[in-house]
Image: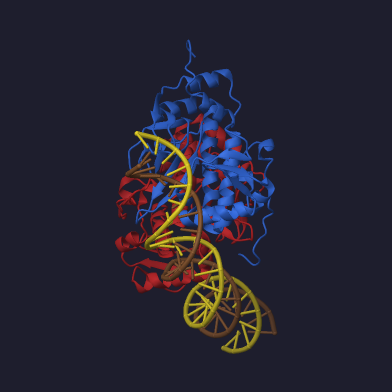
Chain colours: A red, B blue, C brown, D yellow
Amino acid sequence: MSSEPSLVLEPMVRRLSYWSKLNADDRGAILDLPHRAKLLERHGYIVREGEKVSQSCVLLSGYAIRQKIVAGGARQIVAVHMKGDLVDLQNSFLGTADHSVQVLTDSQIAYIPAEALKKLAFDRPTVGMALWLDTLVDASVFREWIANVGRRDAHTRIAHLLCEFALRLKVAGLGEATEYELPMTQEQIADCTGLTPVHVNRTLKALEVEKLIERRSGRSVTIGDWRKLAAAGDFDSTYLHLHENEGALTVRTPGVRRPGRA
Amino acid sequence: MSSEPSLVLEPMVRRLSYWSKLNADDRGAILDLPHRAKLLERHGYIVREGEKVSQSCVLLSGYAIRQKIVAGGARQIVAVHMKGDLVDLQNSFLGTADHSVQVLTDSQIAYIPAEALKKLAFDRPTVGMALWLDTLVDASVFREWIANVGRRDAHTRIAHLLCEFALRLKVAGLGEATEYELPMTQEQIADCTGLTPVHVNRTLKALEVEKLIERRSGRSVTIGDWRKLAAAGDFDSTYLHLHENEGALTVRTPGVRRPGRA
DNA sequence: CGGGAGGTTGACAATCGTCAATCAGAGTGG
DNA sequence: CCACTCTGATTGACGATTGTCAACCTCCCG
């Protein structure tokens, strides 16, 4: 750690601190990572599917999504990211991007060479483990999304998504869990949930009529009754692997097994 | 490497060698990992959702699945694993299992303490990187499954699954890519694809009528025309991150973008 | 030979998609 | 300040992919 480390990568430090106790040297080493900051406009691509990638990317502000396009042109969003998230470890270590990453809003990002990140990971096991855990939690969220899209109906599916955002925004320090600004259009929600925009619209309306959520101007969402919404969304925060206290909003639904399944 | 390393963990060495060039010391270190081998009977659980986990697990023979149960008892299978796969890095490093892992057939497994694995990973960066890449590829497969379940119709979805198995079995050295024994019942295929067993049955029949696959006694599947099946399944092997030559069976479907998507 | 798991098939229901029109709000330029 | 435009939200009518229910069949195994 020479002289004055830039504080640009601070959100990344914050994020990784969540998984491991980092000492001053660890933090310094992260802040000292070579990086290239950039302001990306709404709808800009961080990476495109199929590209060769050698840089990783941290989201410093704004929102981003990962998406895949299937035959026929339909889109599936496979993840949503917010401030501090390492949005491209996945692609960069594997060399070829198997999906695209796009920002939803004007966003500040910082590119970090994958090699530098790799070196840091193995020079400092504490940081390395934090990075690894970060990717493992991403994977856990992917699994939950498979279940969400595969085995829940539209109503449950959207309620689940709203619960996930609520908790993640709170953990990221971006707002209250029960009232937040959803950075997505209904079409984008549809692409997260494997539904159509029309059906999303109807389902949101239904959730509002049931008083599980309220909507005002723009895309603000207020959760009327967290417990009811979590129950409606079959939401159990275990998969987010939050620290004890932060999953507190959660309702645990005991897993009822369908009788007679091998 | 002391005396005679046991060869029990050989499938794990083979698997990790796929991602990094391991030297003799690396291989020796892996084989020397403390482990407890076990024969698990069909339908046995390696881990159950919600349990505390401190052991990782390697599949030495047989097949295993990861699954989640949603409200109402429906099951979603989120991954299928075969010989050599590290089936529980995901759960063990995170401490609490967010999903269950179950073997489909009688299988030999070996438990490895997560701590030992972690130590190995950071003592030997080459091995560490291989382990990390292994988890990143798992994550890539999860993403593809989200897209599969979210945005493809039943016909495409099942064709895609059959293609994935074909390639993975071949890479694992478990058979020819164009003819293999599917270790799953139709109900399990349904749980992989978010469909019902009845619909899976009809869809398989349709694939057979179209001569994309043949079925004989038991669950053997023969792929009639790989290119056609891959096209029908919108299958592009990029997401498996195989080495150049091994994705050769693949057909690349150029991503047609739906017009006018933000 | 009986039992059971899994595979097949038909009739019918429903969730969700498609198509298309209309509406509301934000930004832009004259 | 006010048309104009564009994106996104909303709604209705209708259609289809997929689910449900239930029966029956087939094979395997003790």
Quadrant of the image containing the C terminus of chain A? top left
- Residue B129 appears at what percent x and percent y? 54, 32
Outermost residue, top side: B3
Residue at position x 39%, y 72% in the image: A206
- Residue B124 appears at what percent x and percent y? 52, 25
Q: Give the mark count.
A: 0
Does any portion of residue A2 appear in the rendered image? no
- Residue B90 appears at what percent x and percent y? 44, 39
Please say if A176 is above or below B121.
below
Image side of residue A255 versus residue A129, left or right: left
For the residue pair D26 and A199, the one nearer the viewer reads as D26
Q: Quadrant of residue B23?
A: top right
Please say if B172 is above or below A9.
above
Residue at position x 39%, y 52% in the image: A171
- Residue A79 appears at what percent x and percent y? 51, 53
Image side of residue B227 versus residue D12, left or right: right
Residue at position x 53%, y 37% in the image: A3
Please say if A200 is above or below A70.
below
Q: Quadrant of residue B35?
A: top left
For the residue pair B260 and A18, the one nearer the viewer reads as B260
Image side of residue A107 versus residue A203, left or right: right
